[in-house]
Image (cartoon, rainbow, N blue to C red):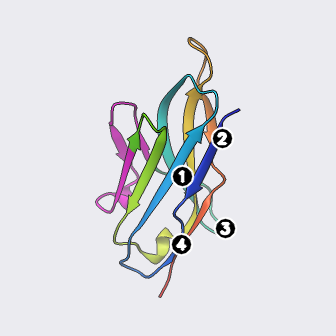
Amino acid sequence: QVRLVESGGDLVQPGGSLRLSCAASGSIFSINTMGWYRQAPGKQRELVATIAPRGSTDYADSVKGRFTISRDNVRKTVYLQMNSLKPEDTAVYYCKIDATLYSGSAYYHYWGQGTQVTVSS
């Protein structure tokens, strides 16, 4: 069983910073892409950032220059450093890991439980 545990969400003032963490555990053979998504009230879930196994990254235009995604392959953890936070960043943030349980098998998506980030003065 794959388990993803997220942490780091909080209430923060505009311009502040937060660091989200998502740690995977269970019988995982290999992890491919890891990423962060968010869902604001009344909106669809959207991609925030992704990171490949060797560190290549992609970001949504709305967070470029402010957010940094990183990963620790040994600890099977993905992070999202969020700086210069804006009210429009308010959302539930979900981590997603593409993982396989056996060598040669397909990768599947696994989702964290979500962590609330609220940016407000």
Give the residue displayed 65% in from the left and 41% down from the top: 3
Residue at the outermost left position: 65
Q: In the image, which is nearer the foreground, mark 3 or mark 4?
A: 4
Instruction: Name the residue located 39 percent from the left edge and 31 percent from the top edge.
Output: 53
Kindly identify which residue carries mark 4. 10
Q: Up-down: is 117 above or below 33?
A: below
Where does label 2 land, which residue? 3
Q: Which residues are magenta?
A: 49-70
Q: Residues within 10 Å of mark 2 (few under 14, many from 20)?
A: some
Q: CA distance from mark 4 to mark 1?
A: 16 Å
Question: Viewer-proximal residue, 59 or 78?
Answer: 78
Q: Nearer the viewer, residue 35 or 63?
A: 35
Instruction: Find the residue positioned furthest to the top.
Output: 104
Q: Position of residue 105 (x, y in %)?
A: 61, 15
Of all residues shown, which one is farthest toward the right? 1
Q: Which mark is residue 37?
A: 1
Q: 10 Å neighbourhood of mark 4: few (<14), some, or many (≥20)?
A: some
Of pointers 3 and 2, the one earlier in the residue sequence: 2
Amino acid type at mark 3: Gly
| Residue that mark 3 sits on | 42
Q: Nearer the viewer, mark 3 or mark 2?
A: 2
x and y percent of residue 69 in the render? 38, 50
Please tell me which residue is depicted at 61% across the width and 16% down the height of the picture: 102
| Amino acid at circle 1 | Tyr
